[in-house]
Image (cartoon, rainbow, N blue to C red):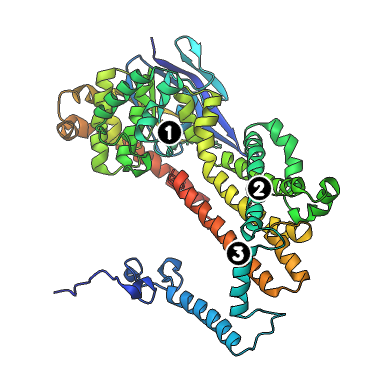
Amino acid sequence: MSGIVADNISMVFTLPNGDQVHALNNVNLNVKDGEIVSVLGPSGCGKTTLLNIIAGFLRPTSGKIIRENMEVTGPGSDRGMVFQQGALFEWMTVEKNIAFGPKMAGRPAAETKRKVDELLQIVGLQDFGKKPVYQLSGGMQQRVALARCLANDPEVILMDEPLGALDALTREKMQSLVLKLWKETRKTIILITHSVEEALFLGERLIVMAPRPGRILREYELPFADRGLVESPRQIKASHEFVETREEVLSLIWGMEEEIMGNDQELEPA
Amino acid sequence: MSKHHTPPSGVSVWLGLKDNVFTQQKTVRFGDASAVNSGRFYSILTVVILLSAWGIASALGMLESFYWPSVNATLTRMGKLLSEGFRNVAFWDHIGISVFRVLGGVLLGALVGIPLGLAMGLSSIARGLFDPIVEFMRPIPPLALIPLIILWFGIDETAKIFLLFLASLFIMTIAARSGVNSVKITKVHAAYSLGASRTQILFHVILPNALPEIFTGLRTAMGVCWGTVVAAELVAADKGVGSMIMIAKNFLQTDTVVIGIMVIGLIGYTIELGMRYLERLLIPWQGKG
Ligand SMILES: Nc1ncnc2c1ncn2[C@@H]1O[C@H](COP(=O)(O)OP(=O)(O)O)[C@@H](O)[C@H]1O
Ligand SMILES: [Mg+2]
């Protein structure tokens, strides 16, 4: 039982000038063991805040995160993180980055080396192990981040727009890689994205969030992640059902964005 | 057919008289500092003009040796300094002792300052305890401490090293502290999620992250200490380049004074170049996070 439960999470940030930001309001979420859930929403709706609370980096104003009947009170190696970018250790080679978790845990060097080699193979970087990470392209760096997370064998993987900084083609390839890894490892995965297509393609379930205050607006059960294991990504993304769902979710998000734009205009001086 | 461009090369490019590969692409020149050619030709011109002026003035006998030595007198004095030394101390020993004092002072300053700065960046107790001292000492020029240090230690080696230790201590403390502040929080979060302990995060994440700033601190400390050691030797010492030019002045040996000043400039420049080289060698990831 390695799912994760967000129980009535609220988060209020207090700014230095005393103003308060209601980043999250009564968020309830139950992610089952082995499930892959995508989270979508306009920027500023509290996605990162929610993930940081689940990871244990932030203490919520009220509510709690529960894993294996225990309340989460801080970060732990059972919950791996993949950040958008800039979280690799640039003073280490690709290999050393991937080996970081096992090395910190004091695993035997030979075992770690075998694991690193295997992961390099899986993410297609077998020729780059000895390179410093800053010499790699953005897509390669995210593959290192993924491998580093997997090397630690966490039960839950939290991803905060891990593909957000990549170009469209690289991004599609990485989506297939994520799907493949999920299929092979059956990790519990929470994936934040701002791409509707990505959210639909990768999530067994989609959570759509809305801003001011940050909250869960809608949930969708999705068939595409499972189908992605047999059909080709292009086929799925072009299928009638996918396009229809995409348009529905897009209009939902567009509605919110327009509301935000409208609000912004009200703030403009006349 | 469009005009075919061959990449610019040759002496005139090296001299900065013609555009190089990078600057030739630019149409906006005034206001873009990276579009300004090196102007190496004019640098050489400056040096040549200065040296010839000195040579001509010497040849015409225009120089009063009390104020500025002729080229010949300088070369003769240089030969003498190299073979006989100055005041029973070999020329290189005068330089060596000054460099040794700087290295010793900076090393001690780094050994104490780096852990102190790290602690101040990581713990509120350390920050609270040492903040008043660091902030108070920071604006005091090290030279202002010389009288007190002479009262405490006299003018022996301990006095000089202690002065340079103080001069570098606060630079290194502040550098290490700001190195900790500049660590990107996502890297620390990533390390915690990978199961690292606090000690592991200190040594494997925070320290390497702070290294670029620590090294910049070291470079600054070297520069400041080189200036400070010369000045301290001017005041009180019987060895070292600073003392050499001060004693030479008392004997009206302007040529030795001029040589000493040139050596001080050259050594300072060499230290700076050496530190930049080490920086590229030891911290190749600098600015690439
Ligand atoms: N540390 C913080 N202090 C104050 N406000 C914050 C902080 N972190 C996030 N916020 C605010 O909380 C809201 C949600 O932010 P975030 O979770 O980053 O949104 P998202 O990831 O969906 O774009 C935003 O309005 C943001 O400005
Ligand atoms: Mg975010």
Number of residues whose C-alpha sits closer than 10 Å to that of mark 2, classed few (under 14), some (14–19) or many (20 or more): many
Which residue is denoted by mark 3 in the rendering?
Answer: B82
Residue at the extreme bottom of the image, as rendered:
B60
- Checking the image for residue B7, the label placed there is none
Which residue is denoted by mark 1 in the rendering?
Answer: A210
Q: Is residue B48 left or right of residue B89?
A: left
Q: In this view of the protein, can residue A124 be seen by the observer?
A: yes
Viewer-nearest residue: B193 or B22: B22
Mark 2: amino acid: Ile
| Residue A12, picture quadrant | top right
- Checking the image for residue B171, the label placed there is 2
Q: Secondary structure at mark 1?
A: strand
Mark 3 or mark 2: name the one nearer the start of the chain. 3
Circles 3 and 1 on the same subunit: no
Q: Is residue B132 left or right of residue A113?
A: right
Residue B144, percent from left and from top: 79, 55
Residue appearing at x 28%, y 26% in the figure: A117
